[in-house]
Image (cartoon, rainbow, N blue to C red):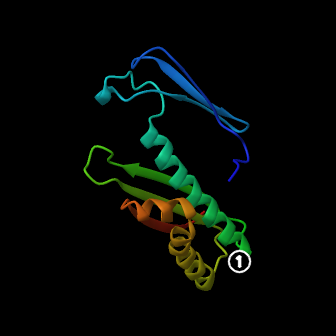
Amino acid sequence: MVLTSPLKLQWNGSVKGKGSIESLFLSNPIAIPTMFGGTGEGNSPIDLLVSSAASCYLLTLVGMLNAQKLDDIELSLNTETEPESKKLTIKHFLEVRVPNDFNDNKINIIEDIINKADRGCHIGNMLRKAEVEIHVKGFVKYK
């Protein structure tokens, strides 16, 4: 598979050096975490892995909401993990803000899609095969 936007990575220095990841739509500093002797002044591989899972979930959710013509919605996703634990666990906390005129049927559809998007995310599904635990907790609120 060819990336739609090829990545270019650079590194300068030793373990305490610094690097970057660049692509057409991405520009991120990378660094070795302090627990491995680095500076920690950039994204670690775990940060990038978890951000991939979070963005995949969010974009899958947006696509599924759009398919149901639920457009006037604001989404906010916070993701946490504990990379020092023996098993990587990713926790997504989603807040969905909807217009005041949304009825119970639309709210029920959104709540159903919150869970379906988790199962529809390709990155999340690949991570589960590697025994990563992923949990989603979503809340629907009126604007």
Say which quadrant the C terminus sits in. bottom right
113 versus 52 height, above or below: below
93 versus 118 height, above or below: above
Residue at x 45% of width, y 39% of height: 45
24 versus 55 height, above or below: above
Give the residue furthest to the bottom: 105
| Depth order, front residue of 141/29 | 29
72 with respect to 76 (left or right) = right
Residue at x 39% of width, y 20% of height: 15
Total numbered labels placed on residues in the image: 1
Please give the residue where the numbered disc 1 appears in the rendered image: 68
Give the residue furthest to the left: 86
Indicate the position of residue 89 as horizontal and vertical percent values: 35, 56
The answer to which image quadrant residue 117 occupies is bottom right
Indicate the position of residue 53 as horizontal and vertical percent values: 51, 55
Indicate the position of residue 76 as horizontal and vertical percent values: 55, 55
| Depth order, front residue of 123/55 | 123
Give the residue furthest to the front: 1
| Depth order, front residue of 92/3 | 3
Identify residue type, mark 1.
Gln
Q: Secondary structure at mark 1?
A: loop
Residue at x 50% of width, y 73% of height: 115
114 with respect to 41 (left or right) = right
Indicate the position of residue 69 as horizontal and vertical percent values: 74, 75
116 with respect to 72 (left or right) = left
